[in-house]
Image (tube, coloured by chain):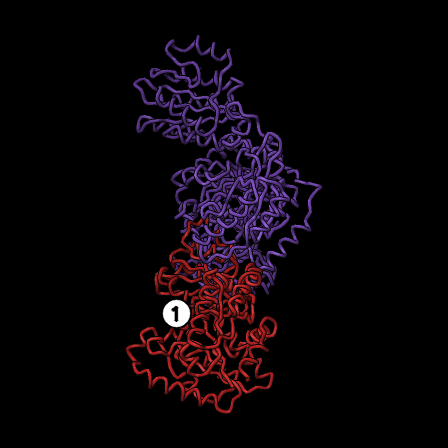
Amino acid sequence: MKNLYIMGTAGSGKTSVATGLALKFSREGYRVAYFKPIGNITGAFLREDEDAVLMKQILHMEHPLETIVPYIAGPSYLSGYKNHCESLKNIRKAYETVAEGNDLVIIGGANFPHIMGCLGLDAPSLAQELDAVPLFMIKINNDYSLDHAIFINNYMQCKGIPVLGNIFHNVPRPLLAKTEGIYRPVLEERGYHTLGIIPSNAVLTSPKVKEYYEVLGGEILAGEDNMDRLVEDTVIGAMTIESALGYLRRNANKAVITGGDRSDVALAALETSTSALILTGGLYPDVKVIARAEEKKVPLILVHYDTYNTIEKLSKVTRRIRAKDEETIKMTVDNIEKHVDWRNVLKAIII
Amino acid sequence: MAKMTNFFNPKSVAIIGASNKPGKIGNVVVKNMINCGYKGKIFPVNPKEAVIEGLGCYPSVDRTPIPPDLAVISVPAAGALAAAEACGKYGVKNLIVITAGFKETGKKGLELERKLVDICRQFKMRLLGPNCVGLLDTHVPINASFAAGFPKKGGIAFISQSGAMVLSILDWSHKAGLGFSKFISLGNKADLTETHFIEEAAEDPHTQVILCYIEDVENGSHFLEAVRAVSRKKPVIILKAGTSQSGALAASSHTGALAGSDLAYETAFRQCGVIRAGNMPDLFDLAVAFTSQPVPRGDRVAVITNSGGPGIIATDTIELKNLKMARFTKETIAALRSNLPAESNIYNPVDVLGDAKAERYRFALEKTLADPGVDNAVVLVCPAAVTEPVETARVIIEVRKKYPGKPLFAAYMGGPKLEEGAKILEEEKIPCFTFPEQAINSINGLVSYARTKNLSAKTELLTFDNIDQKTVKAVFYDVLKDKRLVLLGSEAAEVVAAYGIDAAPTLLASSPEEAVDISGKIGYPVVLKVASPKIMHKTDVGGVKTGLESPEKVRQGFLEIMDNVHRHLPRVIIYGVEVQKMMPQGTELIIGMTRDIQFGPLIAFGLGGIFVNLLKDVSFRLAKGLSYNEIEKMLTETKAYTLLRGYRGEKPADTKAIIEMIARVAKLVNDFPEITEMDINPVFSYHQGASALDVKITVS
C-alpha cells in the first residue's frame, strides 16, 4: 500500500479533492484514513485545523485530532520547533497510528508545498519519508500557474519521487477549452498526466459570509440568519455615489466593503445583488442603513480594521467544507466521479 | 386614487393619547382641533381621564359613540400598534400616526412599522405617518396636528416630508402674511405618500398651487403618472433636498432609502411638468407668484426702470433664465419716444430716468403692457430724490387692473424710503422684492408652467415591427447561466441588433486562428477588443487594436492584447478577443441608459468618444412614455446637435437615424426590466444612417 499526498497552494482545492477521493474510495470498499502532518489554523476564532476536523467526522476516525494533525505550523513556527529528527519521529509515529488497520491513507498537504522546509518537513520531503504518491493541485490564474506546477513536478522527479500527475481545480468556464487544448498537452509532453479538470462551481468554491466573518471578526449588525450566503465577488465601495450604482450592478452575490460612514454606498449596495455588506473603520453606520439591511436580509458586518487592512485580510478567506454541509460534500464526490480519473489514482496507490 | 376626503373633512375625529397635561402632544392636538373651529365631533381617548379640555373622554376608541372617520394616534410607539388595531376592529378607515420611534430609529422600529402597515392593510385603513406632525386644512377647518398656531386661509397646499419644515413655515407664514389651504406632514410615508396628497390637493377647490418639500419620491411610476396629470391642472412646485453629493448622503441617512440620482429627479420633474424650486425662498416666491398672478401667454418680459444699472441686471437675468426680452411694436416705441424725456431709453428695458414720478411710470407701464409683444412685466424703482414710491405703487395697482392677464412684478430697490410703497403693493397682491432677480425668477416659474400646460398630455408610444424578443431572451439566458451580469460585446451587439439597431458585426474569438477566420468572413480591416466582463475601459488596459488589415496583423494583435491585459490586470479572466468590422469614422455619439431606483430607465444622449466624461454634453429623458418629439428635443439640447446639423461645411448627419436608435434603445430597456445599465459608446453617425460600435449591457 502506498499513500496519496495531495499538495497545492492555498485555495487550490486540496480539501475538496481529498474529501471527494476519500469518500469515493471508501464507497469502493476501501478503509480510508486521513492524515495531515502539518496543519494550520485559519480565522480569528478557530483553535483547530479544519481539514482534520472535517475528515475525522466524515471518515469516522477515532483518533484524537492531535494524532491526525501532529503539527500546527503558524507563520512564526521556527520560534517553537527546531529539532528535525524529533519532529520527523513524531510525525511518523502519528502517521503509523492513523494508518493502522486501513487500506489507504490520504495525506493532506500544508497551505503551500514549501512550508516547514527549514526543518526538512516540506511536502516533497514528507511524501518521500511517508512513501506517498504526490498529486499536485493546479489552480489556474494564468500561464505561470502551469509553470509552477511543472516546476514542482520536476523538483519531485529530481528527488526521485514518482509523480502521479495533476488535477486542475476550479477552472473558470472560459478557461476550460484552453486547459484542455493547451495546458493538458503541455503537461503530457513532459510526461505528467492530467488526472482531472474540475470546472468552477460557485456553490463549492465561493466562501460563505460566515467565512468572511471568521477571518475578519467584528460585529454582525443585521442579517444574522443569512450568514450562509455565498460570496462570489468582492467590491470596494469607495466611489462617488453617482458611479456607485453602475459599478455595483456589475457583480452578483458580492461582498461590498466600504467605510461605516458611507451610508450612500451602503444603501446603493443594498439595491443590488449583495451577499454581505462589510463596513470598515469601526464606524457604526446610520440606523437607517442597519434597518435597510435588515429589511433586505443582507448580513451587515462591522469590522474594526480600516478598509486597506480589511482587503489585505480578504486573501485569507477561502471556502471551508464542513462535515454537516451535506450538499457540498456530495458535490465533492460528484466532481471526482464526473471529472477525475479516480480509477488511475486508485491504481497508483493500491499496488 | 385613494379617496382621502375623510382625512381632511371627517365628521368625527378620535384623538388616541389625548391628555390634559399642557405641552403633551396629546393635549396640543385636542386644543388645536378645538381652537381651529372644527365643526365635527371630537372624541378624546384616554383610559385615565374623564374630561379633556372640556370634552368627554373615552377609555378606548371602541367606546366612542360611532366609529370616527379619522383617528389620530399619539400614544408612545409601544402602544401605537394596539391602538391601530383597536381602530381597525372598530371600523376606523383613516389613521394619522403622529408617534415617532418607527423606521427612523432602526431595526426594531422598522419591525414595528411593518406591523403597523400590516394592521392597516388587514383592516383596509389608510395611514398618514408614522412620525409626522399631522395635517390641517384652513377652509374646512381642521387641525389634526401638533403644530403651534393655525395659518391664514389661502390657496397654497404645503406637503412636507420634514415635520420641522411644517412647523417653521407655519410660524413664518404669519410674519410673511402668507395664506395656506393645507399643511400635510408626511412622516415616514409608510402608506400614503406625497403623490396621494398631490392628487388630493389637485381636486381641492381651495388649493391654487401645490408646494412640496421632499427628500425622496416613494413610488416613482405612480408619481410620474399622477403628477403629469395634476400639473396640467394646477402648478406643482417641489423643493427636492439632497441634490449635492453631501446633501444626498445626509438625505440617505435621514430617510434610510437610497434616493435616485438628482439627475433622474430633474428629468422626472421636467417630464411631468413639476416646477422645481432651487431653495426655500424660491419655493415660497413661486407660491406667492402662482397665487397672485395669472399664467402668462409667453416668455417675453418688459422691464420698466428709473435707473440704468438695475435695468441691465434684470436684462441679464432674463436671458440667463431663458426668458426673452420683449421687443416693442413700432407704435409702442413711437408713443414712448414722443412722451418720455429725450434721454430715456425707449427700448426694452425702458428707462424712465431718475427724475421719474408716478405719472411717468404710469405712462410707460400702460404702453408696454398694452403691447401685444409683452407677456410679463417688471417695474424697478430706485429711491432717487424725486421718486414717489407710494404713488408709484398705487399707479402700478391701477394699471394692473386694466391688464389682469399679464403677470406683473415689482422690485423696490432700497430700504426705509421704499418700505411703505412695497407694503401697499404686497397687500394688493403684486409681489414686490428688494432685487430684480427674485422677480424674474418668479416669472420664470410662471412661464415654465405655461409651457407645461400647453404640452399635449398624450404621449405616442414607440412601436416597431422588426423586434425580435426571443433572441434577446436567449442571450440573457446564456449570460445568467454563465453566472455573469455583464454581457460580452458580441452578446450585447446581438441584443441591440435583435431590436433593429444597426450594430457593427462583432464576433468572439478564443484563439488567434479563430480571430483570423472571423476576420476573413466579416472582411478587413477589423478591430480587435478584449472580451471580459470585468474590464470596463478596454483602451486603458491596451485591450483594443484598430485598423488591422491582414491575417498576420490580426494574429499579432490578438497576442498583444492578451499580453497587455494580463500585464494590467493579472487576475482578470479573459474570454477571448472580439473581432469587429472596422467602420468608417463618423461623428462620435453616445446613447446610454441607467435604471434609476425610483423612476426607471433614464436615457442619455450626447457627444461620445473618450471625452464624454470630460465634456458632459449630455441630455436626459426617462424612457417611460418617451415620444419621438421628446427624443428630438433631447438632441437639440446638446452641443452635439450643432455638430450633427453640419458644422463648418461638414455634411449634416442623419438625425432621423439617431432618433430611431434612441427610440429603439428606449423600447428595449422598457421591454426588458432586467437591463440595469446600457451604453452605446460610440455610436458613429453618418450622413446616411448610424452604427453602434461598442455596446455594453449589464443585467440583473
User: In the current view of this chain or complex, which residue is farthest to the right?
Assistant: B465
Residue B205 seen in render: no
- Nearest the viewer among B136 and A310 is A310
Q: Which residue is mark 1?
A: A217
**Residue type beneath disc 1:** Gly
Image location (x, y in percent) of residue A1 = 52, 86
Above or below residue B65? Residue B469 is: above
Q: Residue at x 58, y 72 (%)?
A: A340
Image location (x, y in percent) of residue B547 = 53, 39
Q: Which chain is purple?
A: B
Image location (x, y in percent) of residue B653 = 58, 29
Determine the chain carrying the residue at label 1.
Answer: A
- The answer to whether residue B66 is left or right of residue A74 is right
- Nearest the viewer among A263 and B255 is A263
User: In the current view of this chain or complex, which residue is farthest to the left?
Assistant: A79
**Image quadrant in which the C terminus of chain A is located:** bottom right
Numbered marks: total: 1
Give the colour of chain A: red
- Nearest the viewer among B127 and A162 is A162
Disc 1, SS: loop
Image location (x, y in percent) of residue B374 = 50, 21
Residue B228 seen in render: yes
- Nearest the viewer among A245 and B33 is A245
In the figure, residue B125 lies in which quadrant? bottom right
